[in-house]
Amino acid sequence: MFEKGCNQAMSSGDDKLKSALDIALERASKLGKMSDEEMRETREKELAGVGEALVARYVKGLPIRDIELELAKYKEDRQKIIPYLLDGLWDRLDLENTQEIDKLLSAIEHFTGNSSATERVQSLAIEYRNEVEKTLGKNKNSLEDAKRKELKRKGISGSAVIPIVESSPEWLQIREGLNSRYRKRLEELKSFLKAL
Amino acid sequence: MKLVGDFYAYLWPGVNMQEMMKFGNNCNSYLVANALPANKHVLVDPGQVVNETRQRCLDRLIAEMKKDNLRIEDVGLIINTHAHPDHYGASETIRKMSGCQVAIGKEENEFLKLAGGEMAKALKSMGFEMPEINPDLYLSEGELRLNQNLVAKIFLIPGHSDGHIGIYWPKEKVFMGGDLVFYGSTGRVDIPGGSAELLKKSIEQIAKLDIDYMCTGHQYGSPGILKGKEQIKQNFEIIRRSIFPYL
């Protein structure tokens, strides 16, 4: 039974089936027919991938000197990878992620040799943090009351309970308004600094 | 496993060396059923999702709860006695499953913020990762009022960690002490935030309470729950005599 069914399936779709060898040969012949422009694009994509991967490894903890050693392996392509690497570093900059900002800026400064970008982004980051603290301070009492009421509704109260307002939906909403305003300013600043 | 009244205990295997080797590390979890409106439960120390020996700790907890007709989706509040991953690790996963609130000692969270890096490094060297935790409320010393007349007393019991808390249920005389004491031993004090002097003080403070069920954080080759005033008193005596001089 099984053999019969199997043969039927093979014979019915014979003309549509390609072996792995056929597929590989077809791909290889396609590669052979690539224009110079296509070859250049393929190479650019590869180098962009290297840049992105190096950013990911840097963020995970690979030191700058090791990033440089990796780049050195690409010899004349090193200079082509750096713009992709810088793009990746700029893309990851996020004022909310305070732990990463200094690390990213230090790499940007290293690869651009320009400290003004670092100073301007850091100044915006400080302004953002100050405004978050100021806004939280201004709203703390009402946010705490709202959180306490929510907890009470859920049956949780007593002198041991201290509501955390930073995780309350009301605060997250206020903060999101702040964040979107500063995100816009950061994007404008990034575009300006990248063009320098 | 039903402990008393609406109190349930889910002990992580490890009453002997063979079990300890096979199952690896995770904490004991405790649950107070229907402690909140809409028949929601309070879960103390949910443990990890998966531990260092790839045991699926949370799946096991869910399965054990199911045997008692309790669902993880009905957890309304998680209380973490302290911020070590073998105790709080599954908090955020359970929050996603149940929408529960997550609580921890205030000082513990402050310590995590300040010394998180140092703590993470120390724990990583022991094979633990630091899972995310975003508590909704802190618990400090005082009263925790829940459903109807259910009241718990929260004690700040530092020593094993800086902001460790214990939960005492006076009506049922149940104490959930995390890693304060075990059967014949105490929580270690060599992890960042640990202090031998504070641990001794915390133990003496809790020894004064009227306790019928001492619910410990780990079995470590011994029973995870000490039952009866006499056994609990003896355990404090053994700890004073045999452990305090070496702390």
Image (tube, coloured by chain):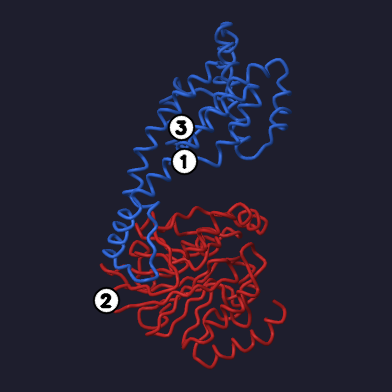
Chain colours: A blue, B red
Indicate the quadrant containing the C terminus of chain A: top left, top right, bottom left or bottom right.
top right
Amino acid type at mark 2? Gln
Distance from disc 3 to disc 1, alpha carbons, whole Å, reads 70 Å
| In front of the other: B159 or B91 | B159
| In front of the other: B98 or B106 | B106
Query: A165 left or right of B55?
Result: left
From the top left corner, tell me how far across and down residue B123 is, in percent. Answer: 63, 58
Seen at 34% across and 61% down, the residue is B73
Amino acid type at mark 1? Arg
Q: Residue B145 occupies which quadrant of the picture?
A: bottom left
Q: Residue A27 occupies which quadrant of the picture?
A: top right
Above or below, B47 against B239 in this view is above
From the top left corner, tell me how far across and down residue A174 is, in percent. Answer: 33, 43
Q: Pinpoint the chain carrying mark 1.
A: A
From the top left corner, tell me how far across and down residue A60 is, in percent. Answer: 61, 40
Indicate the quadrant containing the N terminus of chain A: top left, top right, bottom left or bottom right.
top left
Q: Which residue is mark 3?
A: A7
Q: Which residue is mark 1?
A: A129
From the top left corner, tell me how far across and down residue B60 is, in percent. Answer: 47, 65
- Considering the numbered disc 2 on the image, is that residue within a helix, a strand or a loop? loop
| In front of the other: A184 or A154 | A184
Distance from disc 2 to disc 1, alpha carbons, whole Å, reads 42 Å
Distance from disc 3 to disc 2, alpha carbons, whole Å, reads 72 Å
Question: Hey, which residue is sitting farthest bottom in the picture?
Answer: B230
Camera-nearest label, 3 or 2: 2
Asked if badges 3 and 1 are on one and the same chain, I answer yes
Q: Which residue is mark 2?
A: B148
Q: Give the crowd class for mark 2: few <14, some 14-19, many >=20 residues within 10 Å.
A: few
Q: Pinpoint the chain carrying mark 3.
A: A
Q: Pinpoint the chain carrying mark 2.
A: B
Amino acid type at mark 3? Asn
